[in-house]
Image: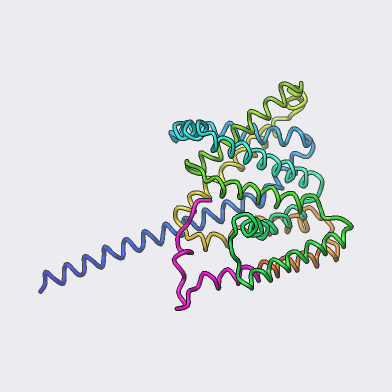
């Protein structure tokens, strides 16, 4: 009898330890996910500090330093064989090149928005991104939406029309940022990578790095890109590469330890932070039309998220299995 009691106690202790370990892992994963979006959200502060260096230097230096860090990461983590496997597959290589071009276009637009005092528009663009991604999913991948989600999409579309009417045009940053990023995600969906996402991103950076190097060398831009840079600016350029790559490592760490449904909520953090920075830190004017557009957009996101939550809940009131496993994007 005492032996059975002892075994029961040991089993309970073992279960408790495993539960505590899973809980700790989930907490760390959530913290890493939040950290990645917070870093992305505050990037405009870093790039605004490089305004004096000029647009060309900022984008070139960001790409080159991120490429250097990607190479270091591939070597230090033993992922070179994965890289070789990726680039020797024609379909994967083509998808990598397309994704690299879309990523470069996204960065060009984002840095242009920051250096031309359009941080608020950039934040609104990233707020639109999840909804535009859904539109591509419906149109291209033939995914289905609930009635509530359709309402959310229509409200978002109305907010875009309102923005165009109020401003006389649709802000470039608010339009191009979600378009390029949603297309980037769509290509990854259409051609799933045969390697892990960090190797895939590093391969895209190598493509961007080579293209940028050709632009600098062939175009005679070497001196304009590296001359007249202070020690403080060099430090910020290196930091821009680090703060571009590090959030991706954090995000992938989070994906392995947190439910995708929980992690998905944090995706709006960077957009909200950038909007707040634009209005409060950079003192960008927020017109009545833009404010109304922002309110409509937030309403659209709430409606859409509510529709998604209803879909994830089964008829018995329990979370469906589809929403319990993190999936690599």
Q: Does residue 49 appear left or right of residue 163 in this picture?
A: left
Judge from the rendering whether residue 47 lies leftward or rightward of residue 169; answer left or right.
left
Residue sitting at x 71%, y 47%:
45
Task: Name above or below for residue 218 compared with residue 277.
Answer: above
Q: Nearer the viewer, residue 56 or 261?
A: 261
Q: Position of residue 267 (x, y in %)?
A: 60, 58
Say which quadrant the N terminus sits in.
bottom left
Viewer-proximal residue, 226 or 178? 178
Q: Which residues are drawn in magenta?
A: 303-329
Magenta stretch encompasses residue 173: no
Task: Based on the picture, tell me whether residue 309 belongs to the magenta stretch.
Answer: yes
Residue at the (60%, 46%) spot, across then down = 187
| Side of 293 relative to 5 (left or right) | right
Residue 54: quarter of image: top right
Give x and y (percent) for residue 100: 63, 38
- Nearer to us in this view, 51 or 158: 158
Query: Does residue 73 sit above or below 165 in this rendering?
Result: above
Residue furthest right in the image: 168
Q: Residue at x 82, y 55 (%)?
A: 170
**x and y, in percent, of residue 10 in the image:** 21, 65
């Amino acid at each position: 009898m005492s032996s059975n009691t002892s075994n029961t106690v040991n089993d309970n202790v073992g279960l408790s330890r495993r539960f505590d370990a899973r809980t700790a892992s989930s907490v760390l994963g959530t913290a890493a996910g939040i950290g990645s979006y917070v870093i992305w959200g505050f990037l405009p502060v870093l790039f605004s500090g490089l305004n004096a260096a000029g647009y060309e230097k900022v984008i070139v230096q960001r790409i080159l330093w991120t490429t250097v860090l990607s190479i270091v990461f591939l070597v230090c983590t033993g992922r070179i064989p994965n890289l070789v496997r990726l680039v020797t597959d024609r379909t994967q290589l083509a998808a990598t090149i397309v994704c690299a071009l879309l990523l470069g276009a996204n960065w060009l637009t984002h840095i242009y928005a920051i250096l031309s005092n359009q941080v608020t528009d950039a934040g609104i663009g990233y707020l639109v991104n999840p909804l535009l991604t859904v539109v591509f999913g419906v149109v291209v991948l033939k995914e289905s939406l609930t009635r509530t989600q359709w309402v959310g999409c229509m409200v978002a579309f109305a907010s875009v029309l309102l923005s165009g009417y109020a401003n006389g045009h649709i802000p470039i940053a608010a339009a191009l940022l979600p378009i390029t990023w949603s297309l980037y995600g769509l290509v990854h969906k259409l051609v799933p990578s045969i390697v892990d996402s960090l190797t895939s991103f590093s391969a895209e950076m190598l493509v961007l790095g080579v293209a940028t190097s050709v632009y600098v060398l062939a175009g005679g831009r070497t001196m304009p890109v590296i001359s007249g840079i202070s020690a403080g600016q060099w430090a910020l350029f290196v930091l821009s590469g680090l703060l571009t790559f590090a959030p991706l490592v954090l995000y992938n760490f989070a994906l392995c330890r947190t439910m995708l449904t929980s992690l998905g909520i944090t995706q709006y953090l960077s957009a909200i932070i950038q909007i707040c920075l634009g209005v409060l830190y950079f003192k960008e004017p927020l017109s009545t039309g833009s404010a109304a557009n922002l309110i409509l957009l937030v309403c659209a996101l709430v409606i859409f998220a509510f529709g998604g939550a209803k879909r994830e809940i089964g008829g018995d009131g329990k979370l469906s299995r589809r929403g319990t496993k993190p999936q690599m994007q």
